Amino acid sequence: MPDSLVSKAAGALRLDVVFGDTWEAVAPLAVPFFDGQQVQVAFDCGAVPEAGFMRAADAALLNLLALGEAERLAVTDAVMANYQQALLDDGEPLPLTQPSDIWQYIQPRHLLVRFEEDEAQHDIYLLIEAECAWEVEHGLQLVFRQGRMLTRMSQCDGHLTESSAEGIAEEQDALMMRYYAAFGRPTNQ
């Protein structure tokens, strides 16, 4: 079993000694999508990562690190929908003068790189858990498939897609359909 790993995107990694199945980056990573805010990165790959995992994980992380303000603004409507739902559930309104102001109230904390392999999903997902002002208890979760594009936004629940979380057909998952329109469906599905 290796005692250390190196990610080309996140740097030196150390094995989580408590659970023994997650590798954590020694230093947080500045993420341009969040205006360079520092995020702690972990790789959910077991004590001995499968062949090819780190290569795919690094590619996904580098994709995410290439996303910036334009991509953040492109998903502001999804963040606003999450915020509006919280207001309907007795949330307190925030002093927003324009929709993009919502990003001031989001602080990313953890980024988990995860390979999902089941009958519907065979890919690398980056799951970012953030604190947000309108959902203090459950936070905000943003999921990026291959680090390329947002494919899910919800409270922090660990689900990678809306179709898996809600038990709906993938064709009813609007963010996933947007991803497929941009990048095509994987051939391994």
Image (cartoon, rainbow, N blue to C red):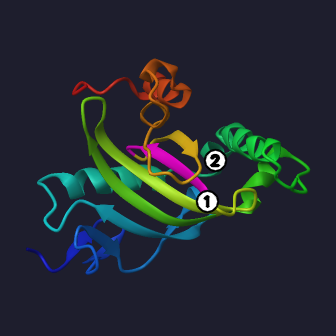
Is residue 145 rendered to the left or right of residue 44?
Answer: right
- Asked if residue 175 shows in the view, the reply is yes
Mark 1 — residue?
Answer: 34
Q: Indicate the position of residue 105 as horizontal and vertical percent values.
A: 74, 61
Q: Is residue 96 magenta?
A: no
Mark drawn on residue 72: 2
Residue type (three-letter) at the residue carrying disc 2: Arg
Q: Is residue 119 above or below residue 113?
A: above
Percent x, y of residue 172: 51, 20
In magenta, the rendered stretch is 138-146
The residue drawn where x is 86% and y is 55% is: 92
Relative to residue 81, is residue 49 depicted above or below? Answer: below
| Residue in the picture at 11% in, 75% down | 2
Q: Residues within 10 Å of mark 1 (few under 14, many from 20)?
A: some
The vertical placement of 80 against 47, above or below, is above
Q: Where, quadrant-wise, is the N terminus in this rendering? A: bottom left
Q: Amino acid at mark 1?
A: Phe
Q: Could you say which is closer to the camera, residue 151 or residue 83? A: 83
Q: Residue at x 72, y 38 (%)?
A: 81
Q: Furthest-front residue in view?
A: 90
Query: Is tag 1's residue or tag 2's residue first in the polypeptide sequence?
Result: 1
Please give the name of the residue rendered at 38% of the width and 23% of the height, measured from the top-left corner.
184
Q: Is residue 8 left or right of residue 108?
A: left
- Indicate the quadrant containing the C terminus: top left, top right, bottom left or bottom right: top left
Dots 1 and 2: beta carbons under 8 Å? yes
For mark 2, give the secondary structure: helix
Crowd rating for badge 2 (residues with CA inside 10 Å; few <14, some 14–19, many 20+): some
